[in-house]
Image (spheres, rainbow, N blue to C red):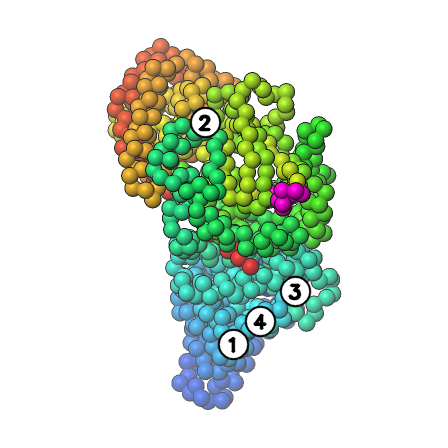
């Protein structure tokens, strides 16, 4: 019961109060009185004399009496049977009292809440009162819905009966022409948990509160079922509230204790509002036909199919190169970047408006790389979504010291390890300091530009498609004259540097070793001593419109040079478009998928895990996954990006690219066939188990390929990648006990796999996994873009 009351307190905290239901010495008398009152209520309710004043008076008196005393469960069950009829009364007073009674019973206990929401007729009648012209009735009905929302079952039943659509329509009818809000502090110190108060009146607050609660309860399918036009119009209204709330949050315009007595406060928080906007945009196409699909390809990479083919075969993930603005490939540069340039107020005024640009941005909270359910992400960031920029996560303000070649961070006290526990959320004064830091030689680096500007998102989306990856990224770097931002370093992903304004000098070294760095592996900052100066070094001077490609693993650094005589603007603004190759979409990942899919076709051949032959087959397949990883640690081909899912607007490209991918696949299969070392793989698993680690942790993402969860005798461990370390240890112990027999089975599994696996079968499954990752990344991008469209 306390949980239900707490929900009410936390979700509507306005001027509404429920009459006390405290017990007294007259409790028994009250119960006897109520027992006599029910027959009167039933007789009056069932009377056909709806216009009879005396009948209505009896009903009102009875309902008032029931609401003025502690509600008894046995009485409530009887009275609820009359509620559908009473809620449809022509008397506004009766309908209001009945709605209040339904709400009170919903808060009585979980069991009574369940009883209320299980009554189809009561719920439909209550929902039908929302859009009525009788204001008091609408407010009572909203109150009742909020009480019902105190349980998950209640919220789901309301969604089932289209209460959300009714609330959204009603809010759009009464919201008025302007939004006046204020913020106040709540119980949580998190800035995203600030409560929002409204000056519009009680009814709009109730409608909006109930709608937001239900929106934030919806699953993906329920969100899809909201009529698109209604969702669009309601989103516009939410963004009006969001715009004002965001402005007050950034400016720390927050009411103190005792202030805002004339406001209607709800416990709608910044994060609640942001989540609703995010959710309503998940299924919206954020990329209308703003440009032809092949402009990004022609502008950044090539002017013909042969140019791209040369790039893929000779430079991709190997050598840097540059595309100059005035080449035939870049004639349409303005069409790509003009919109983004305009949003930054053009180059003549851009640096001076830096702080105002930062004020319009929010934190793009990170999503796990293997997260394939956007609602899980929203659950994890609840009470955080919508907060301002976070130092070192969304923005870095830094420079490289000329003497020591080390990075100096402007917000130094917040850039060490403790920031993980206590992130530095930028306030208004911090944003002004960013402008000061720029004037003092610091570079301002903004991450996640594809989540903040629609035109950048469009370019990044096309870039990911070209290279067959689920997503790509974009960062922005603003560097003042005669300065260096980041120290020499290498990235774990390939980047395309697009020079937007000004110019910059780049120095790029060839990869220190033949192995490509993996995504999320530590990338150490390098100094001059760690670079072999005898290796190739490339120097590029970028002007506006130039595009520079830097392969992952290549150390690089860049700086600005300002010469008044050359007439340049002095500063530099560039975007880095990053192509991140996640583990499933490397060639090693493709080979893991190949083994997984092949093994699934062998499923009917596997004996039970209760038998020795079953254990030997299961572990031999698992051990072959370990072998693939070990070979990948030494052969660079395994770490290269798999382009099987690449899509180009040039139809002829797909044929040679497909043949190229087939050739790589054949090479890797032959490599596995020749270099699979049983004992090395066995030692690797043994070492992991001794460290109490899961030897298969790095390929847990394979579970997303196994939707059906097929099983042998209730469970197929060979297809289930979410098993405990104890189970792995026990099965492996049996496997090692019969080592020689295990080796023979392993060699047989390896041979059959290499001889039988089909590239086409693997490709189909690979693309399905690619689509799953891509869908969630686009949902995240859509949500963040919607929160930045203010």
Q: As rendered, which of 153 and 580 lies closer to the eye?
A: 580
* Residue pointed to by mark 1: 137
Q: Is residue 250 left or right of residue 691?
A: right
Can you tell which of label 2 and label 3 is closer to the viewer?
2
Residue at the spot 60% in from the left edge and 51% down from the top edge: 347
Q: Is residue 158 left or right of residue 207?
A: left
Q: As rendered, which of 623 and 533 lies closer to the eye?
A: 533
What is the magenta range?
564-572
* Residue pointed to by mark 3: 182
Residue at the spot 32% in from the left edge and 15% down from the top edge: 747
* Residue pointed to by mark 4: 178
- Quadrant into which the N terminus falls: bottom right
Say if 416 sits above or below 39 in the image: above
Marks 1/3: CA–CA distance: 27 Å
Q: Is residue 269 visible?
A: yes
* Residue pointed to by mark 2: 318
Which mark is first along the chain, 3 or 2?
Answer: 3
SS type, badge 1 = helix
Which mark is first along the chain, 1 or 4?
Answer: 1
- Magenta-span inclusion, residue 368: no
Q: Is residue 750 left or right of residue 185?
A: left
Residue at the spot 57% in from the left edge and 33% down from the top edge: 506
Which mark is first along the chain, 2 or 1?
Answer: 1
Marks 1/2: CA–CA distance: 70 Å
Marks 2/3: CA–CA distance: 55 Å
Query: Number of numbered discs present?
Result: 4
- Quadrant into which the C terminus falls: bottom right
Residue 776 placed where, x, y %?
Answer: 44, 45
SS type, badge 2 = loop
């Amino acid at each position: 019961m306390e949980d239900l009351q707490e929900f009410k307190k936390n979700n509507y905290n306005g001027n509404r109060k429920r009459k006390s239901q405290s017990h007294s010495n007259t409790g028994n008398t009250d119960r006897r009185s109520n027992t006599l009152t029910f027959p009167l209520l039933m007789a009056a309710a069932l009377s056909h004399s709806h216009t009879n004043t005396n009948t209505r008076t009896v009903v009102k008196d009875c309902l008032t009496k029931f609401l003025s005393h502690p509600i008894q469960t046995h009485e409530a069950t009887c009275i609820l049977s009359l509620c559908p009829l009473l809620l449809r009364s022509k008397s506004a007073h009766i309908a209001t009292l009945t709605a209040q009674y339904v709400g009170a019973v919903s808060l009585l206990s979980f069991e009574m809440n369940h009883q209320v929401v299980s009554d189809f007729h009561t719920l439909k009648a209550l929902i039908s009162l929302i859009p009525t012209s009788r204001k008091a009735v609408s407010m009572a009905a909203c109150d009742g819905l909020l009480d019902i929302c105190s349980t998950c079952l209640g919220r789901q039943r309301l969604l089932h009966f289209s209460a959300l659509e009714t609330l959204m329509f009603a809010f759009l009818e009464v919201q008025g022409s302007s939004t006046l809000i204020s913020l106040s502090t709540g119980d949580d110190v998190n800035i995203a948990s600030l409560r929002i108060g409204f000056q519009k009146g009680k009814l709009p607050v109730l409608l909006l509160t109930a709608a937001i609660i239900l929106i934030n309860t919806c699953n993906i399918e329920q969100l899809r079922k909201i009529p698109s036009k209604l969702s669009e119009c309601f989103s516009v209204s939410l963004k009006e509230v969001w715009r004002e709330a965001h402005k007050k949050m950034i400016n720390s315009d927050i009411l103190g204790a005792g202030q805002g007595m004339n406001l209607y406060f709800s416990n709608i928080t910044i994060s609640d509002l942001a989540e609703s906007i995010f959710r309503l945009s998940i299924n919206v196409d954020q990329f209308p036909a703003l440009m032809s699909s092949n402009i990004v390809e022609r502008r950044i990479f090539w002017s013909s199919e042969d140019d791209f083919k040369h790039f893929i075969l000779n430079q991709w993930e190997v050598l840097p190169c540059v595309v100059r603005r005035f080449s035939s490939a870049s004639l349409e540069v303005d069409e790509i970047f003009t919109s983004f340039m305009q949003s930054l107020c053009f180059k003549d005024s851009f640096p001076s408006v830096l702080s105002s640009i930062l004020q319009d941005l929010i934190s793009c909270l990170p999503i796990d790389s293997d997260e394939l359910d956007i609602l899980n992400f929203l659950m994890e960031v609840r009470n955080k979504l919508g907060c301002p920029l976070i130092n070192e996560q969304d923005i870095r303000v830094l420079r490289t010291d000329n003497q020591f070649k080390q990075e100096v961070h402007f917000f130094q006290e917040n850039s060490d390890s403790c920031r993980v526990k206590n992130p530095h959320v930028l306030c208004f004064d911090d944003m002004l300091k960013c402008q000061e830091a720029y004037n003092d030689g610091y570079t301002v680096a903004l991450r996640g530009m594809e989540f903040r500007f629609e035109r950048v998102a469009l370019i990044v989306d096309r870039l990911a498609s070209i290279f067959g990856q689920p997503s790509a990224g974009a960062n922005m770097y603003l560097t003042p004259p005669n300065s260096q931002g980041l120290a020499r370093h290498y990235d774990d992903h390939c980047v395309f540097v697009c020079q937007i304004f000004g110019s910059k000098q780049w120095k790029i070294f060839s990869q220190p070793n033949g192995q490509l760095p993996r995504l999320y592996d530590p990338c150490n900052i390098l100094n001059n001593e760690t670079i072999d100066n005898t290796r190739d070094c490339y120097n590029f001077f970028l002007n506006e419109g130039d595009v520079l490609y830097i392969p992952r693993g290549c150390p690089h650094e860049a700086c600005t040079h300002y010469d008044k005589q050359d007439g340049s603007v002095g500063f530099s603004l560039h975007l880095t478009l990053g192509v991140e190759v996640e583990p499933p979409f490397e060639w090693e990942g493709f080979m893991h998928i190949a083994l997984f899919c092949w093994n699934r076709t062998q499923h009917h051949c596997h004996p039970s895990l209760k038998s020795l032959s079953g254990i030997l087959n299961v572990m031999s397949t698992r051990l072959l996954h370990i072998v693939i990883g070990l070979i990948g640690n030494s052969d660079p081909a395994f770490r290269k990006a798999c382009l099987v899912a690449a899509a180009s607007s040039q139809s002829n490209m797909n044929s040679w690219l497909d043949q190229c991918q087939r050739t790589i696949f054949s090479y890797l299969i032959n490599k596995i066939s020749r270099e699979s070392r049983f004992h090395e793989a066995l030692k690797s698993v043994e070492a992991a188990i001794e460290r109490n680690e899961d030897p298969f942790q790095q390929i847990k993402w394979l579970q997303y390929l196994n939707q059906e969860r097929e099983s042998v005798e209730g469970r197929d461990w060979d297809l289930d990648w979410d098993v405990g370390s104890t189970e792995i240890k026990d099965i492996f112990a049996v496997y090692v006990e019969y080592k020689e027999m295990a080796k023979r089975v392993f060699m047989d599994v390896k041979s059959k796999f290499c001889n039988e696996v089909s590239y086409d079968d693997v490709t189909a499954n690979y693309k399905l996994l690619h689509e799953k990752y891509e869908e969630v990344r686009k949902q995240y991008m859509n949500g963040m873009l919607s929160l930045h469209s203010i």
